[in-house]
Image (cartoon, rainbow, N blue to C red):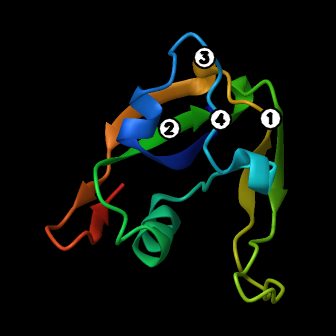
Amino acid sequence: MPLHILHLVPADYFNGLPASKPYLPKEFAADGFIHCTKEPEVMLKIANRFYKDLPGELLVLVIDADKVTAEVKWEAPAHPDGSTASAGEPSFPHIYGPLNREAIVEIHPAARADDGTFLSV
């Protein structure tokens, strides 16, 4: 059974990229990797914490981790305040390079309320 991981991206940005080229988010140059999550409920919490006020449609990329050609590392979360992860926190899949399009197995919009709250991913 394939391991699916999730990545959230603004629809305008993703749809504006050439479909024939690997995907890189705007933040890749600063972060050095592509942020992903495994569990939809964790993605939902992250979306509501960091992206609730971001206008426009956001897409969820469902990625088959076994098809990713770049290195995928499972790492502790990076907290904005610089603190380290506490015991029991989930580790996150980070993709260290461009995402080959063949690894993207599904794309769907994230459902949001009128106030920007994410309802489902």
- Give left or right: position of 5 versus 32: left
Q: In 3D space, how far apart are the residues under numbered discs 3 and 2 (Cα atoms)?
A: 11 Å
Mark 4, other Cα within 10 Å: few <14 / some 14–19 / many ≥20? some
- Name the mark nearer the viewer: 1 or 2: 1
Q: Position of residue 18 (x, y in %)?
A: 52, 16
Mark 3, other Cα within 10 Å: few <14 / some 14–19 / many ≥20? few
- Name the mark nearer the viewer: 4 or 2: 4
- Name the mark nearer the viewer: 1 or 3: 1
The label number, if any, that marks residue 102 in the structure image: 3
* Earlier residue among tags 1 and 2: 2
Residue linked to disc 4:
24
* Earlier residue among tags 4 and 2: 4
Q: In 3D space, how far apart are the residues under numbered discs 1 and 4 (Cα atoms)?
A: 8 Å
- The three-letter code of the residue at mark 1 reads Gly
Residue linked to disc 1:
97
Q: What element carries label 4?
A: loop
Q: Do the residues labelled 1 and 4 touch (CB within 8 Å)?
A: no
- The three-letter code of the residue at mark 4 reads Leu
Indicate whether 77 appears above or below 59.
Answer: below
Q: Position of residue 82 (x, y in %)?
A: 81, 86
